[in-house]
Image (cartoon, rainbow, N blue to C red):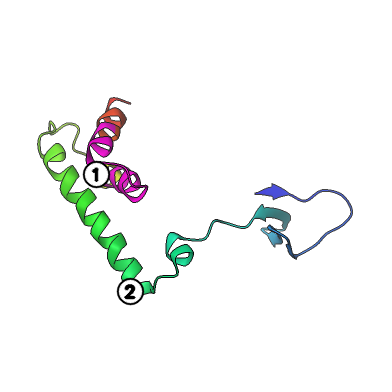
Amino acid sequence: MAKQSGDLRFTGRIGDLIFYEAFGKMLVRKVGKSGSCKEKKEDKKTCKKKTNEVFEKASLLVKPIYAGMPKDIKKHGVFGRMTGIANSVLQNRGSEEDAKRKILNSLGN
């Protein structure tokens, strides 16, 4: 998101730029990427089912890692963050080993 500058104040779309007003400021942004479902022209149910299956896989991958963690590290939101990392890797067609590696690296930070 960027601020519009100059005398011209515009709302609308030009190419892949969207001009708009928010919180009293004139802003501009690029059009976001379309989702993978739109690119593949799949129906919403099929796409959502695939997404849910990958998220379930991510959650099951994180479960034993989280169970083996010391209690002082198990705080609110840790399991969710770990699952989010795993889900991100798996959604981008990464392997389970890549997901585990990324989770363990994030715990070190």
Q: Quadrant of the C terminus?
A: top left
Which quadrant of the view contains residue 76?
Answer: top left
The secondary element bearing badge 1 is classed as: loop
From the top left corner, tell me how far across and down residue 19 is, in percent.
72, 60
Q: Which residue is denoted by mark 2 in the rendering? A: 45
Q: Where does residue 2 sit, x and y in percent of width and height?
A: 69, 47
The residue depicted at 29 percent of the width and 63 percent of the height is 50
Q: Main secondary structure of the magenta part?
A: helix
Label 2 crowd bin: few (<14), some (14–19), many (20+), radius 10 Å: few
> Which residue matches tag 1?
76
- The quadrant holding residue 33 is bottom right
* Residue type, mark 2 in image: Lys
Q: Earlier in the sequence, mark 1 or mark 2?
A: 2
User: Where, by quadrant of the figure, is residue 61 drawn?
Assistant: top left
Q: Is residue 91 magenta?
A: yes
Helix, strand or loop for disc 2? helix
Q: Nearer the viewer, residue 98 or 78?
A: 98
- Disc 1 to disc 2, C-alpha distance: 31 Å
Horizontal and vertical percent position of residue 53? 24, 60
Amino acid type of the residue that numbered disc 1 sits on in the rendered structure: His
Q: At x 17% / y 31%, what residue is drawn?
A: 72
Foreground label between 1 and 2:
2
Magenta residues (range): 83-101
Q: Residue at x 31, y 31 (%)?
A: 106
Taking 103 as reference, is 44 above or below it?
below
Residue placed farthest to the right in the image? Answer: 7
Going by the image, does 24 lie left or right of 64? right
Q: Are marks 1 and 2 in contact (CB under 8 Å)?
A: no
Residue 35's spot in the image, x, y percent? 47, 60
Give the camera-side residue of 107 and 94: 94
Q: Residues within 10 Å of mark 1 (few under 14, many from 20)?
A: few
